[in-house]
Amino acid sequence: MKFCKTYQEFMRGQEQKKLPVVGFKKLKKIMKTCRRSSPYHRTCPDQCTVCDGTFFPSLLNEMSEIVGCFNERAQKLLELHLASGFRKYIILLKGKSKRNHSTLVHEGKDLVVYALINAVAIRKILKKYDKIHYSKQGQLFKSQAQTMHKEILQSPWLIELMALHINLRETKSKSRKSSALFDECYLTIKDGKPSLACELFDSIKVDIDLTCSICLDTVFDPVSLSCGHIFCYSCACSSASVTIVDGLKEAHSKEKCPLCRSAGVYEGAVHLEELNILLGRSCTEYWEERLQMERVERVKQAKEHWETQCRAFMGI
């Protein structure tokens, strides 16, 4: 595996940050268990209990650690970037670290690279597994991992970091000291439909459609469900059978994503603040028009909500 050396070299540079990694060498040994134990049989069946029972649980644990670590670090980084005044001071104090603007930008870039290179690593190791065992268990496992929300490319914090870098590049382009550290993240608008893309490796490209599948328009006040699908906040509330006033956290656990039909995806929904800023700057006319429409709808729902609350309080 040529990529194995590239991956190991990158992760060696991240040792001080104590980031979890995919154990290439260990997984390669597990993949060849059947071939070593039975020299007369060069292949194993499509559902080999020896290989499947050791390889996939081990890989799933590593994927869980990688996604968990990435989400936690990206969330803290973005909270610090969006914070201001006393709140920012408190966050810095809790973290016991002094981070300036350039440090935050550099950490953001490293996290994006970390996410993408691990996505490549997992994809390659699964492809190698299927090739060695002449099976499709690796492809099935990838689908199952996506259903379990263990796929790092599904993370809403990856979208936020990509949007953050584009925002920084646009707002700080005139400053020599404060500029985004790479240009591979970009927003494209084709036929009035925006998409977010990132290219850091030849073998992978992240391309995220920013069209809400409910209203079929550019996502406004975007929110990402736990399954990774993005919708307008108002559209997501409508699909979850809750009002904008109540919010997505009040959605019933049985409510499903309109696209993948996964249940229980609303409670952990994430507001995409950086993406909201990016789209507001890039689609100004549409944004102003949609803002007026949303304001009217939210005032209407708020009025209905409080009227209902008053009637309930008065026993009417």
Image (spheres, helix red, strand yellow):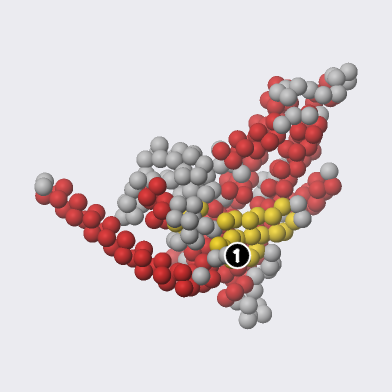
The kind of residue tagged 1 is Lys
Residue 127: x percent and y percent? Answer: 75, 38
Q: Is residue 32 left or right of residue 195?
A: right
Q: Residues within 10 Å of mark 1 (few under 14, many from 20)?
A: few
Residue 55 or 312: which is nearer the viewer?
312
Closest to the observer, 64 or 224: 224
User: Can residue 169 be seen in the rendering of this structure?
Assistant: yes
Where is residue 69 shown, x and y percent of the image? 60, 48
Residue 120, percent across and down? 72, 48
Count of number-bearing discs: 1
Q: Is residue 72 left or right of residue 313?
A: right
The residue located at (51%, 70%) in the rendering is: 283
**Would residue 273 be seen by someone viewing this image from the given angle?**
no
Residue under label 1, please give it: 190
State which quarter of the image contains the N terminus: top right
Q: Residue at the location (69% across, 55% down)?
A: 205
Compared with 172, 152 (above or below) is above
- Residue 2's place in the image compared with 25, above or below, is below
The residue positioned farthest toward the right in the image shown: 40
Residue extending furthest front? 191
- Could you tell me which residue is drawn at 61 percent across and 44 percent down? 151
224 or 105, which lies in front? 224
Tell me residue 228's x, y (percent).
54, 48
Mark 1 lies on a secondary structure that is: strand
| 15 sits to left or right of 151 | right
Residue in the picture at 36% in, 69% down: 292
